[in-house]
Amino acid sequence: MRSTLIVGSVAFDTLHLGGVCHSKVLGGAATYASLAAAHFTQVQLVGVVGQDFPASATELLRTRGIDLAGLEVAKGDTFHWEGRYSDDLSSRETLRTDLNVFADFRPKIPKSFRSAPFVMLGNIDPGLQIEVLDQIDKPAFVLADTMNLWIDIRHAELTKLCSRVNMLVLNDEEARQFTDKSNLVQAAHALRKLGPELVIIKKGEHGALLFEGDDVFALPGLPLSHVVDPTGAGDTFAGALIGWLARSPDLSSSNLRRAVLHGSVLASFCVEGVSVERLAATTTAEISARVEQFRRLTSF
Amino acid sequence: MRSTLIVGSVAFDTLHLGGVCHSKVLGGAATYASLAAAHFTQVQLVGVVGQDFPASATELLRTRGIDLAGLEVAKGDTFHWEGRYSDDLSSRETLRTDLNVFADFRPKIPKSFRSAPFVMLGNIDPGLQIEVLDQIDKPAFVLADTMNLWIDIRHAELTKLCSRVNMLVLNDEEARQFTDKSNLVQAAHALRKLGPELVIIKKGEHGALLFEGDDVFALPGLPLSHVVDPTGAGDTFAGALIGWLARSPDLSSSNLRRAVLHGSVLASFCVEGVSVERLAATTTAEISARVEQFRRLTSF
């Protein structure tokens, strides 16, 4: 099995959802992405946690075969984010961010991870994402995720990063913000000019768009009657996507489309439970069944 | 060819788009819907215009084979709407509404139209939509469109109308408003309980959802690099959809999906020009090519 290096945050989230507070549940981009990717590939996780990080959480990751040699345990507390979602889950506000050990995070890639052919640079400071690339052998495929904060305050580094990645993943609002183009087709083409030959624009419940040359693939979101917690859905999407590519290392258009499909399938499970609870419980049979659901959803 | 009765507004629109003002161009739900439906069915239009309505506009409709026996010419001026779109076309504000002859519009269905098997009740007061149904023979299929205004001020009439239609078409915001459910799957099921066995939720650039029993079909919007004027896209969608059903009167799941596809295809042309200019110029060959584009867009 080809291995996939996943770098990003491992965190505690305190989530206010529909009037209920879920205190310090497992979160973080690398956590979600790794759990999703582990269905398809050998995951090598790089991140940092504090001394308060529970053995049960590392155990959960380890049982999925995730290699934690790159999970540094630093003095202090684990990164903690607290947020409140609107009743319809369409927006959220940050109530508190305790960077803790994440404040001084400088990813150190273990020797055994440096030749991973597939690399996912989760959403962290683009300067650190570049540092990761500087430490590793030339990988076959690099996916980078980002967010509005870095587009705002690290525009130059993010632009530099773009020239070194194969696929950039971001949401519609971020694509517009990064390129100053309101039209998503134009935004995607502007992003591709910065380097990545592949651009994915995530649209939450509306699905995702994959731009490859002049070709576009659009996959709608699966209409779900009960969405519980959208946290980590984007990270789950990206993790499953790169995991799928690592398992079937074929970058043909049709396989890229299947990768987007598997990203969407895992993300659809992710949002059905609080924190990683539903994602972590997802079985291979459930994934296959939902792939069929997507086929039925979209066929004409 | 099976005929389709289309009832709705015929209007002048003054559109402020990207700093340019397009004064008193042809508009109205029945206009857009009829031009789209005429590709597939014999259209019988019912509406009202004023004495200022130009011969060139009636001529345009007539050349598409649209039967104008139900287009009343009343004393006064044609309904006129003026609006300004935001630069990214994602929102619009109404600057002025001159109801003019539309204020007293009571649809009168000509005898020759009363047996039309397919009926589209464009977005007008649901009380008038019911009056139309009271004047006609039992049609095979009735589609009703509506808007936030009627959900607000004609909730009871709209609910009553729902029990008499086969398909309700509305946008996501309206579906949520009508049912007080933020989840679209739940909203669609609540709407189906009011009567229509088919519910379509339009999501603008994000495409459309068709709910049929427990089955859902999701068609993404075609990502377009140049969108010029979104006016009438929803009416165009509904018109082409019912036109397709009238041409191939088969209400199987797969044909309903193809109807949604053709609705989306015509809507994608509609937004590429100001007023009806691009829609009116659309050829059968272009429609076929864009169907193929949708296939490529969505296949995996």
Image: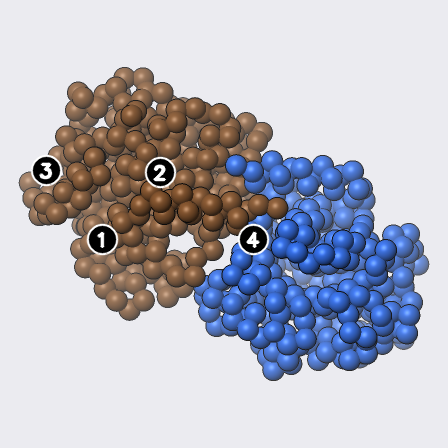
Chain colours: A blue, B brown
Do the residues at discs 3 and 1 belong to one chain? Answer: yes
Name which residue lies at 57% across and 31% down. Answer: B215
Q: Position of residue A211 (x, y in %)?
A: 56, 60
Neighbours of disc 4 within 10 Å: few (<14), some (14-19), many (20+): many
Three-letter amino acid code of the residue under disc 2: Ala
Q: Are marks 2 and 4 in contact (CB under 8 Å)?
A: no
Residues under labels 3 and 2: Cα distance? 26 Å
Residue B71's place in the image compared with A60, above or below, is: above
Q: Position of residue B60 (x, y in %)?
A: 18, 44
Left or right? Give the position of B36 relative to A191.
Answer: left
Tag on residue B13? 1
Q: Position of residue A44 (x, y in %)?
A: 85, 63
Name which residue lies at 63% across and 41% down. Answer: A294
Q: Inspect this view and state whether residue A72 appears.
A: no
User: Which chain letter goes with mark 2?
Assistant: B
Query: Considering depth in this image, is B278 or A207 the residue closer to the camera?
Result: B278
List the residue tagged with mark 4: A217
